[in-house]
Image (cartoon, grey):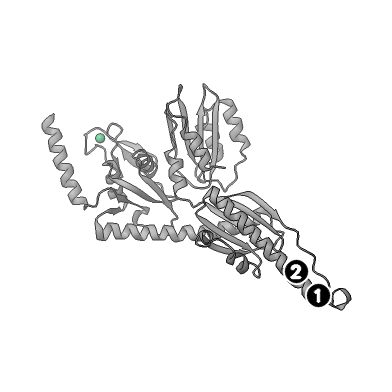
Amino acid sequence: MLTQEEITKLSRFERLDSPIVSFYLNLSPEMSWKKVQGVTLKDLMKEGREQIENLALSKQEKGLAIFSQRKNKRFFAYPLYQPLANQVVVDFDIYINPLVNLMGQYHRTCVVTVDQKRARICEFFMGQLEGLMDISDVIPKRVRTGGFMGYGSKNMERHVDEGVHRHLKNVAEKLFEIFKKNHFDDLILGGEKKILPEFESLLHSYLKERIVGHFQIDSEASLTDITAAAQKIEFENKNKRDAELVHQLQIATFKQGGGVIGLDGTLEAISRGHVHRLVVHEDLWRPGVECKPCGQLRVDGTQCPQCDKPLTSVRDIINQAVEHALHQKAEVWYVPPQIPIADGIGAFLRFRVGITELEAVDVKANKKAARRV
Ligand SMILES: [Zn+2]
């Protein structure tokens, strides 16, 4: 599972003594898994290939990040539940920008399921659920109505309720301990309808304000069932956040001059290094052209408008746009195609100025450069 600790571990390999290959693979349907194995992974060392084969990837994974250093036999592979642009970078530094970017889009969520005597605390991140703690408390058994010698049943019930209350309190305390260590962003509560409100009332205010959803679930539920319920809530919440982001992009573009929407404008902004956050539809791809010497990206054309060199056609200009943006330390946000954006792409800019003003600045810069030459 890809975690913050893993990212930290990777980022600690500062300058390496031999090159490391950073691969990012898009596992979208058009890129069949056989093709990935046959062509893209040809250069990986044998052990690496075996590890990848053993990952037993399913249809759920939409991406794969691989880091391979031949000399020290270092090899890391992380299946990802989000699509990302295909990239291969060979360098003495590990290239983790795409991973860091991807992780920034997701909320670290804690999922707790409780019943009358048991509880399960899990961490849910980027579509994966991992158990953190199972709690089970001893609660006195409920006696048959009528009770022993016809009295005591009321006492017994109060005793049981107190037992359940103590159990829920225990879970709430353990949960707070975990929160102080793990600092999750969101909290999802699952369990029987009749005990969830009581459990919620026992939570620390820090935890209460992080609740983003509830679900009803049987106490016998498996991790798979819990994952499905958490995924549904996370999916709805992420959709809301994505829709809000696109709304902000529209405001930035049409009211404040701090954004751009549409392929031509976005490619231009990326070519100039003006993008702060790229927003792109998940499944978007289309052919285009690139100037290898100066990095200009265009939808079409044969000659670079910046340096007059011939433009090279690329299979997917969106992939190139994402790659350039990440290299410029811009954020890249993938949003589902159901949220409308013209051409499926746009960007928040680093500067709050209109494109015409940007052009004026660039014309000046070009003139200066020309004079220097
Ligand atoms: Zn050029």
Task: Give the percent coordinates (x, y) of residue 152.
Answer: 82, 75
Task: Give the percent coordinates (x, y) of residue 317.
Answer: 36, 42
Disc with the residue nearer the chain's start (2 vs 1): 1
Q: Amino acid at mark 2?
A: His
**Residue pictured at 36% horizontal, 38% vertical:** 327
342 relative to 22 in the view: left or right: left
Report if the beta carbon of the residue with label 1 is closer than 8 angstroms to ligand 1: no
Residue 235 circle label:
none
345 relative to 44 in the view: left or right: left
In the rendered image, which quarter is residue 271 located in? Answer: top left
**Residue pictured at 45% horizontal, 44% vertical:** 84
Mark 2: few/some/many CA within 10 Å (<14, 14-19, 20+): some
104 relative to 198 in the view: left or right: left
Q: Nearer the viewer, residue 14 or 257?
A: 14
Whole-Å distance between the Cαs marked 2 and 1? 10 Å
Q: Nearer the viewer, residue 170 or 81?
A: 170
Q: Which residue is labeled 2 in the image?
A: 159
Answer whether residue 371 is visible to the viewer in this image: yes
How many numbered discs? Answer: 2
Q: Which residue is labeled 1 in the image?
A: 153
Q: Quadrant of the N terminus?
A: top right
Mark 1: few/some/many CA within 10 Å (<14, 14-19, 20+): some
Q: Is residue 321 above or below residue 144?
A: above
In the rendered image, which quarter is residue 303 located in? Answer: top left
